[in-house]
Image (cartoon, rainbow, N blue to C red):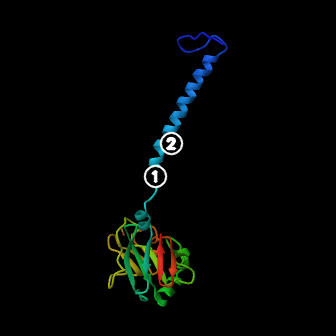
Amino acid sequence: MASVEHSDGQSLSGGEGVRRRDFINIAAVSFAGVGAVVVALPLIDQMNPSADVLALASTEVDLSAIQPGQAIKTTFRSQPLFVRQLTPAEIAEADKVDPSTLRDPQTLEERTVDGKKQWLITMGVCTHLGCVPLGAGEGENRGEFGGYFCPCHGSSYDTAARIRKGPAPKNLEVPKFSFTSDTAILVG
Ligand code: FES
């Protein structure tokens, strides 16, 4: 059927032109949608972490050389990480504290893995303003509660790395970790 179109494409005969114009609009929107997908894909691809980034996201730590009472400093995601084997006396010291009296109430059990509470894994970042506390290195000052001591403003952490004195608001953070064997952990 012939139809007469006005300059704006609208038809006088049965709206065929209107439908065609709608089709053109829909097609334009569809192309815009395809364009968005084409643009989005490279962005999503860039957001997927590469293998070396994934490797950085977790850290394996060999525990075999850390004796009771010793600690090591390593790094996790470019931040200091403290790995410490507590002595039975340090465990007893942590356990005798009533957690309800603490600024950031937590038991040693809650901060360690079941059956392996001698292994205290924490970030080495003071929860006040982010200094690296002392206490993980050989002969360093562990503060009056025997855990870690932050020299920046005097925060003292106990043998479960819980804040006991000074301006820090929280315990040293325990990162997500798991044992991959009796003598190794995977952090992250
Ligand atoms: S940064 Fe540790 S006490 Fe201020």
**Amino acid type assigned to the residue bearing label 2 in the image:** Val
Answer left or right for 95 relative to 80. Answer: right
Most foreground residue, 141 or 36 = 36
Residue at the image point whose x is 44% and y is 59% from the top:
49
* Quadrant of the rendered image holding ligand 1: bottom left
Disc 2 element: helix
Most foreground residue, 1 or 89 = 1
- Residue at the far front: name it: 1
Residue at the image point whose x is 45% and y is 53% from the top:
47
Q: Which residue is mark 2?
A: 37
Return the mark for residue 9. none
Position in image of residue 14 (x %, y %): 67, 14
Q: Is residue 37 above or below residue 23?
A: below
Number of residues whose C-alpha sits closer than 10 Å to that of mark 1, classed few (under 14), some (14–19) or many (20 or more): few
Q: Which residue is mark 1?
A: 45
Residue at the image point whose x is 37% and y is 75% from the top:
74
Can residue 184 be spotted in the picture? yes
For ligand 1, tell me if the residue under mark 2 lies within 8 Å: no
